[in-house]
Amino acid sequence: MPVRPTATRPRPTSLAAPLTAAALAVTALTALTACGGGSGSDPDTVKVSFKQSTDNSIHVMDDHLAGIKKQFEKNNPGKKVELVPIKAPDSEYYTKLQQMLRSPKTAPDLVYEDTFLINSDITSGYLRPLDSYLAKWRDWDQFIDTAKAAAKAQDGRTYGVPDGTDTRGLWFDKGIFEKAGLPADWQPKNWDDVLAAARTVKRKVPGVTPLNVYTGKPAGEAATMQGFEMLLYGTGDGTTDPLYDEPSKKWIAGSQGFKDALAFVETVYQEQLGPDVSTALDPNIQTIVRGDLLPKGKLAIGLDGSWLPQDWLPGSGHEWPDWSKELGLAYMPTQHGQAPGRVSMSGGWTWAIPAKAANPDLAFEFIKTMQTKANAQKWYVANSGIAVRKDVASDPAYVSAQPGIKFFTDLVASTHYRPAYPVYPRVSTAIQEAMEGVTTGDLSVAEAASGYDDTLKEATDNQVIQK
């Protein structure tokens, strides 16, 4: 998802104040302990924990799960569902979730897991393999192989059921482009074209942000995946992973592609083509982009994900009926326009059962209710997600349900997946630190890349190859 990722539009903006990871942990642990998690909990109640938006006007997940809860309880008399939302930015959600999973007293029965973190949690022993359940679930055959692989551990077992995937590209404001003299059917052929458009906007349309690229530790995985990796994976030949060397099973240090990606980020912020640095490093930057900058015509180009329209749909709290008329879509080009010419990253989220869950059987029954064809299709559309069920992906009602679905679904053919091995979260944090250094100007590209290489060696126990 993922990361999952974010979007924004014209609307009210009362943003929830970010809490510290420690405060969130205390809040969540207190709430779960109070409702009797783990041993001794009600065998007829399934506790479902999920990430709740920090934007108080966004209720997409809440509303969807409320509907599934009602359906599940109706179809299973005597059984109850207790929804346990965690309101936090992505990075703090991960911290809080891991703290909850450590004890049977606080572990819910079902948790929402980002695919980038799932292998780390599997290695820590926090999750339960689902193979025995999946073998008896007919619908599992409908899930595409790449989605299944995202939830499979190095031990060959599957620990999560994917609820959709995503792709990424360039969103642009047609009105701003018109004022800048840029084409309504804009499609950059290389990085220079992207920067040239941003510079044109800066020169001809003052008062707007030319280009947003998520950066730094406050943005978390959004900085790594929507920002840096969308650049890094466009620096090579498109056939080899620039972050992890599969043949040697080692992480890659010292690459020119890494430095080039950092140089792009440095250019965006040192030329003041992006948001001001304080805004770029705000933990709520994704909400700011989706709920303010884009919908209010204050951002010309956003490097972002397929899910943005979820914030703009009717009932979202940030309704933007004309978003598909006012925004254009372009794929992110490779660095020099080399084949395959376009870049996307894909991730997504899964539903997983904690190892210390009190009611795992009931939790899987809830998964089965969520993941019927009808419920899955409803979720993909509400969440602006990309289908991972084959029967949904081939349904004309899904393909035509929302503008942009075909554009982002077509990117799956040239998309990339993160090397989501257990150490990846630490690698991701090191990338964010390098990005932040060049964003603030505290580090040169060479210094930031060198610091990344040093941290990479430490994080991976020196399982590094120079390229």
Image (cartoon, rainbow, N blue to C red):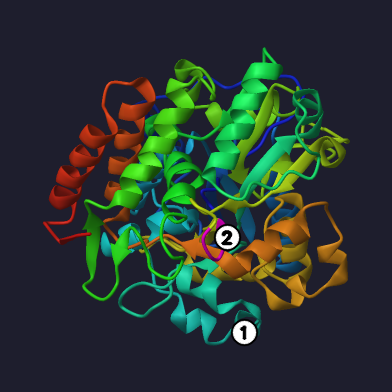
In the image, taking residue 67 as reference, residue 161 lies left or right, namely: left
Three-letter amino acid code of the residue under disc 1:
Asp
Q: Earlier in the sequence, mark 1 or mark 2?
A: 1
Residue 420 in the image: state x and y as whole percent.
Answer: 37, 61
Q: Is residue 259 visible?
A: yes
Residue 244 sits above or below residue 427 on the image: below
Query: What is the magenta segment's predominant secondary structure?
Result: loop
- Magenta-highlighted residues: 338-343
Residue 342 covered by magenta stretch: yes
Residue 250 in the image: state x and y as whole percent.
Answer: 21, 65
Q: Residue at x 33, y 58 (%)?
A: 243
Which label was assigned to residue 141?
A: 1
Q: Secondary structure at mark 1?
A: helix
Q: Nearer the viewer, residue 430 or 63?
A: 430
Q: Nearer the viewer, residue 41 or 329?
A: 329
In the image, taking residue 396 as reference, residue 267 lies left or right, namely: left
Q: Secondary structure at mark 2?
A: loop
Residue 189 covered by magenta stretch: no
Identify the residue under disc 2: 341
Residue 133 sits above or below residue 321 on the image: below
The image quarter in which residue 438 lies: top left
Q: Residue at x 50, y 56 (%)?
A: 42
